Amino acid sequence: MLSCVNRFVVFGLIVCAALILSSMTVIAQTTRLEVELSNDYVESGIPNGTLSAYIRNPIDSVGGFRIWMQLDRPDIIAFVPTTPPHLNFDTSGTVVKGWEILDVRSLAGSLYDVQVVAIADDAGPGPLKRGFGPSSNLRTLIKIPFVVLPGTDTMTDPTVHVYVNTSFHSAFDFSTPDGQTIPWAESVGGQAY
């Protein structure tokens, strides 16, 4: 049988273990990264606009990512092509300016979806690029121009929702500069109207 002191020690260890395990669950489920899309308004008669993606990463540095965005109304706006299937993008004033690999393309071969794959350092010769560090502030990740399609009916609801596709695991993925996946990432969709 356990003495009174031994029972107290065993009880204390069980309580400590329970507290540690319960706090680990809270830490593990904290959102470590958030992506938010802009809500853009385009005046009637203006032929184009820009969809901006923003990031808040209070815990981890980011060295690479893949994100797939889709429009729900391809009859109103379209992303701007360069050489098919590639799409136009802008990194001025963003956290990925100067990154070595940026591939922006349509996975469906249309102008109504866009996948962005970005890697800070291509592992080639030259100085090592470490991506961008943690921040609790919302910062601009990338900007994707779009055009308003001719003949858009202004009498009906001209709102276009832009969705970040998180249904496919590999369609929404962020990693640290060392290549470790950043868990507990969330996204907030945007709209253009």
Image (cartoon, grey):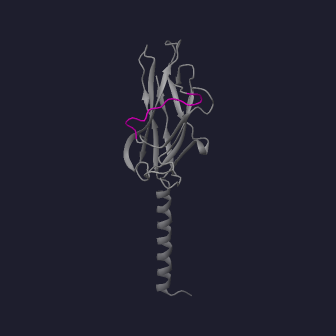
> Where residue 163 appears, x then y in whole percent?
54, 33
> Where residue 119 appears, x then y in whole percent?
50, 45
Q: Nearer the viewer, residue 101 or 75?
A: 101
Residue 154 on the magenta span = no
Q: Main secondary structure of the magenta part?
A: loop
Q: Quadrant of the N terminus?
A: bottom right
Residue 115 is left or right of residue 12, and the answer is: right
Residue 43, above or below 38 = above
Which residue does the image show at 46% across and 58% down from the upper left?
27
Residue 29, above or below 37 = below
Residue 26, above or below 186 = below
Q: Nearer the viewer, residue 126 or 10?
A: 126
- For the record, the magenta segment spans 83-94
Q: Nearer the viewer, residue 74 or 133?
A: 133
Q: Quadrant location of residue 99?
A: top left
Residue furthest to the front in view is: 125
Which residue does the image show at 49% across and 24% down from the upper left?
146
> Where residue 91 appears, x then y in whole percent?
42, 36
Residue 18, above or below 76 = below
Which residue does the image show at 46% across and 76% down from the upper left?
12
Residue 132 is left or right of residue 25, and the answer is: left
The number of numbered discs placed on residues in the rendered structure image is: 0
